[in-house]
Amino acid sequence: MRKLLAWIIAVACCVPLGVAAQSPHEIRQDARLTAQDLTELRSIEEPPPGVDWRLTAGAARTFNQDGARQWSTPFQLRALFDRGRSAFKVSGDGISSVRAADGNRSGLSDVNVVLSRALAVGLIGEVGLTMPAGGEVGSDAGRKRIGAAYNRHLAGHWDAQVQYRLVRFDADQPAGVSRFRHHGLLQAAYNFDTPRTALTFQIARNYRHGAGGATQAAATFEYPLREGKRPPIGALGLTRGLSAGSRDTTLEIDVSIRF
């Protein structure tokens, strides 16, 4: 894990910038929701049998540096089973609408299907694929992925998580552009005394040889919407692009409901 952490820090800090950002809604949302699951599993001795379903749905408004405006509806449906050791996830940016100087576009975004498995305490591996949605905002070809996430309690109210994902593009790429894109994420969460209330900070980075990369910083406040054993959780987030040419700003809100 030390080598993995060192690699992500190197990618986030040392790779040349200056390329357009690619929406990292899914990896940031997944990292935050995965941390919720792992934090809860640490607090109980034996997870119950059966399947624990959770639906997270929300809306995101992005103000691009070039003047474009975008609405999207990020979501994730998660089924946790095998006493919390395995999870099946379906996610994506949902319906998206873009208003730009070169015209307006709207439609359904690509859909991700992922299977994850606990490999050790706090360590999760994942495999998955992206199904192209086509149309004005979706892709014309799919992608495949492998990844890992490691979460641990630090001290006091703080938890930390590191996440890495390698994505392979099925479509033919221009000369000099790699089929593989790297995603790295660092996350720190402060858990308040009120149960299920947290302030999460993230640095996310993606990079593809021949196409460059982009870095974003995000902060999200999570809070229970009512009292109870498994209350719905609301989240308010702000994301800011840090790369030259892609200093976009995104406001996000979502709600997670378990059933």
Image: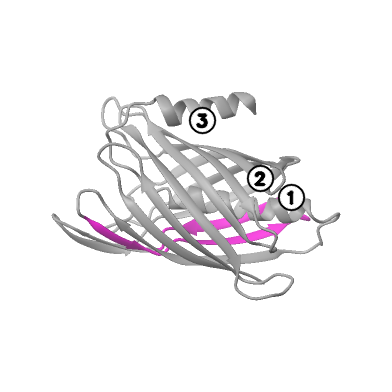
Q: Secondary structure at mark 2?
A: strand
Q: Against 90, is 6 above or below?
A: above
Circle 1: residue type: Arg
Q: Residue furthest right?
A: 45
Q: Which residue is mark 3?
A: 8
Q: Taking 144 as reference, is 259 left or right? A: right
Quick check: can you spot residue 179? Answer: no
Q: Secondary structure at mark 1?
A: loop
Q: Which residue is mark 1?
A: 85
Circle 2: residue type: Asp
Report how far apart the C-alphas of labels 1 and 2 lie in the structure. Answer: 20 Å
The label number, if any, that marks residue 159 in the structure image: 2
Q: Mark 3 or mark 2, which is nearer the start of the sequence?
A: 3
Circle 3: residue type: Ile
Q: Neighbour class for label 3 at 10 Å: few (<14), some, many (≥20)?
A: many
Q: Which residues are magenta?
A: 68-94
Q: Neighbour class for label 2 at 10 Å: few (<14), some, many (≥20)?
A: some
Camera-nearest residue between 193 and 224: 193
Report how far apart the C-alphas of labels 1 and 3 lie in the structure. Answer: 25 Å
